[in-house]
Image (tube, rainbow, N blue to C red):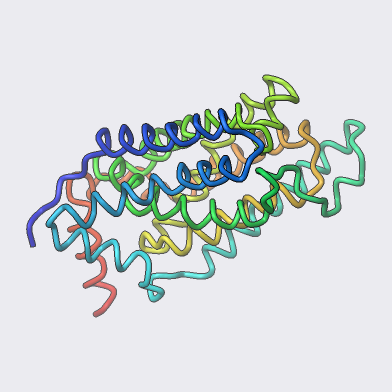
């Protein structure tokens, strides 16, 4: 099969431009059903751009790899997904416990209502859509585009920053989780961008350990989003949570050095995956 060369800069420029265009329009038409439609259109731009890059590439290896990442449930290794979910749950418990030690409320050990609603649309629906749709774009093409040129460690750092920046317009859109953070203060906005990096180390670990399965990262993304919204953590506790997420990411990297620092896939990500699958089939 013909070798494929990923185009990360072109992909992110197009994905960002289209998403931000719709989201800026949503800010203008705030508090309306039309605003939610614009929000949704912005959300689906990364997967649409990813699909365009894949299926207009005329590269059969890239197309087959994308299909396998979605429907290849044989790729899944549930123990890593469960371990990631359990690890995040422990992070949440430690964060709340630390908060209580410094005077925080014990009521944080409870479920709460969603903190946002966009144009009257259910926050649960928004979270479900975000968890599924985003992963089609980021894991469908975006992460691999960077990963094809760097180790998974460098890729995670770069993607964590990019993914955080992608959300910028949402901080100006009333009704969003991000707008609520901006109203609380600059510290909480900064914490969001910082937390994006360790959270993505968890995502990358699950992604690569599950043979680059999009479905695996969808499950984890959904759990992370629900955990952030349904657990009654205070904004201050979420700052503490970022510290524990950093510690978790360090542990993950140190216990998976070969995964994060190997470079044999650089420049030949698809070929390396194909070789690994042939080994697994034997």
Q: Nearer the viewer, residue 5 or 78?
A: 5
Figure check: 103 above or below 125: above
Residue 164 visible in the snapshot = no
Instruction: Write the residue at 62% across / 33% down.
Output: 30
- Residue 151's x, y, as percent? 31, 41
Q: Quadrant of the N terminus?
A: bottom left
Q: Is residue 106 left or right of residue 154?
A: right
Q: Quadrant of the C terminus?
A: bottom left
Q: Nearer the viewer, residue 184 or 204?
A: 184
Q: Nearer the viewer, residue 81 or 258?
A: 81
- Residue 281's x, y, as percent? 26, 78
Instruction: Write the residue at 10% across / 53% down.
Output: 3
Outermost left residue: 2
Outermost bottom residue: 282
Instruction: Write the residue at 50% across / 59% down.
Output: 218
Q: Is residue 50 left or right of residue 127?
A: left
Instruction: Write the residue at 22% across / 45% down.
Output: 266
């Amino acid at each position: 099969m013909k070798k494929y060369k990923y185009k990360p800069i072109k992909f992110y420029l197009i994905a960002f431009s289209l998403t931000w265009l719709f989201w800026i329009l949503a800010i203008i038409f705030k508090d309306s059903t039309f605003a939610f439609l614009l929000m949704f259109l912005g959300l689906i731009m990364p997967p649409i751009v990813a699909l365009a890059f894949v299926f207009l590439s005329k590269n059969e290896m890239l197309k087959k790899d994308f299909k396998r990442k979605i429907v290849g449930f044989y790729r899944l290794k549930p123990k890593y997904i469960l371990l990631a979910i359990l690890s995040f749950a422990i992070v949440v418990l430690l964060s709340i416990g630390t908060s209580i030690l410094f005077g925080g409320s014990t009521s944080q050990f409870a479920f709460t209502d969603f903190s946002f609603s966009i144009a009257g649309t259910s926050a649960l629906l928004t979270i479900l859509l975000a968890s599924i749709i985003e992963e089609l774009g980021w894991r469908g093409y975006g992460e691999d585009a960077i990963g094809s040129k760097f180790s998974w460690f460098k890729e995670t750092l770069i993607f964590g920053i990019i993914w955080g920046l992608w959300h910028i317009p949402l901080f100006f859109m009333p009704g969003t989780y991000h707008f609520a953070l901006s109203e609380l203060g600059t510290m909480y906005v900064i914490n969001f961008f910082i937390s994006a990096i360790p959270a993505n180390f968890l995502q990358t670990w699950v992604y690569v350990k599950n043979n680059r399965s999009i479905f695996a990262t969808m499950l984890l993304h959904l759990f992370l989003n629900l955990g952030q919204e349904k657990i009654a953590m205070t904004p201050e506790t979420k700052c503490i949570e970022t510290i524990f997420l950093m510690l978790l990411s360090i542990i993950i990297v140190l216990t998976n050095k070969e995964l994060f620092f190997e470079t044999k896939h650089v420049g030949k990500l698809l070929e390396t995956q194909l070789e690994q699958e042939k080994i697994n089939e034997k």
